Image (cartoon, rainbow, N blue to C red):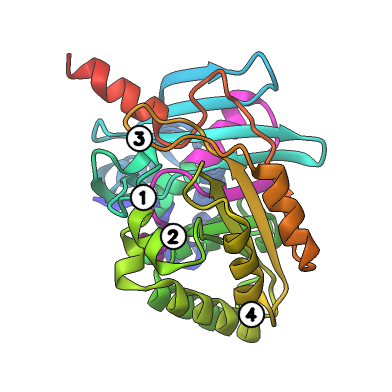
Amino acid sequence: MIDIKSLNLQEMTQLLRDMGEPAFRGKQVYTWLHKGVTSFEEMSNLSKPLRAKLQEQCYITVPTVARKQCSAQDGTVKYLWRLGDGNCIETVLMRYHHGNTVCISSQVGCRMGCAFCASTIAGKVRDLTASEILDQVMFTQLDSGLPISNIVLMGIGEPLDNLQNVLKFLELVNSPDGLNIGMRHISLSTCGVVPKIDELAALNLQLTLSVSLHAPDSETRSRIMPVNKAYDVEELFAACHRYFQKTGRRISFEYAMIDGVNDSDQQADLIAKKIRGMPGHVNLIPLNEVAESPFKPSRRVAAFQKRLESHGITATVRRSLGGDIDASCGQLRRKAMEEENR
């Protein structure tokens, strides 16, 4: 069976030609799928025999809402989507004055093992297909009734660990015949898979690369991020400099502020030293407490920001959203799994 929503327009057109149909049918089917139809029967401008043929050879991915939590504080909405195989993933809709942003997942679970993250506690189950990544944007938009203007690939999973499907998703969501969300409105986050950063740089996409840094020295970073043992922080910064040289795009460095672990003035000074030579933005993240983690939120966020700014580094503190709805990555899925296993 063909995962029809993971096909780009050219592939869709070829599929319909192979079925003996004229080329324009490909665009018709493609358009229907990107409107969020859940069955071939909804494609009313196709003949019944063609709909039957598509049903026989293809399937349409359709996530269902397993849980939905709406923040009374700021309007943030967190979805727990149930996929066709029963697995669940999370998507968060965040409302800003400049538009609506959706934070989406790229894998079911995660194998990266970051010590402060709930997403990785049960490990990785599988990669998401391009259609399953796209569905999060499409069905969040349909369910909420709000237009999505920005996408961040910062949900469950490591996007560069599922690079081919993520690249296909980017092609689909960027398509003028689909949701048509421009690359400059998309951010892709990585914990530092260096070879894949170089692979992404070679494509010269105009998206924003966000690097989950969380510590500028290898001793601290290895303690909280196992990926650092494969690609240490020196290799990571070298890859970031190569990425900037290739694309000309400023990198955003994500930095979860952990009390007594990564929040010293010396570490702020080291970040500034490592970034020097390329435009970099440091996004300081007040840590969300995870029950299974010993780490606590830093009390030095403002002082750390001031120290970075003293070196000429642009540093902002991420606005904390959805604190009343388990909006931290992986928390809702984790809670649902625990309840199902009781």
Please tell me whether mark 1 or mark 4 is closer to you in this view: 1
- Asked if the stretch drawn in magenta spans residue 148, the answer is yes
Q: What residue do we see at 65% from left, 62% from top?
A: 183
* Residue assigned mark 4: 244
Total numbered badges shown on the rendered structure: 4
Secondary structure beneath dot 4 equals: helix
Residue 191: x and y in percent read 44, 60
Q: What residue do we see at 47% from left, 65% from top?
A: 167
The amino acid type, in three-letter code, at marker 3 is Ser
Part of the protein shown in magenta:
136-163
The amino acid type, in three-letter code, at marker 4 is Phe
* Residue assigned mark 2: 191
* Residue assigned mark 3: 293
- Give the spatial CA distance, label 3 vs label 2: 18 Å
The amino acid type, in three-letter code, at marker 2 is Cys
| Badge number at residue 97 | none
Please report whichever mark, 3 or 4, sits nearer to the chain's N-terminal start.
4
On the question of residue 60 being in view, the answer is no
On the question of residue 326 being in view, the answer is yes
Q: Is residue 61 left or right of residue 170?
A: left
| Badge number at residue 114 | 1
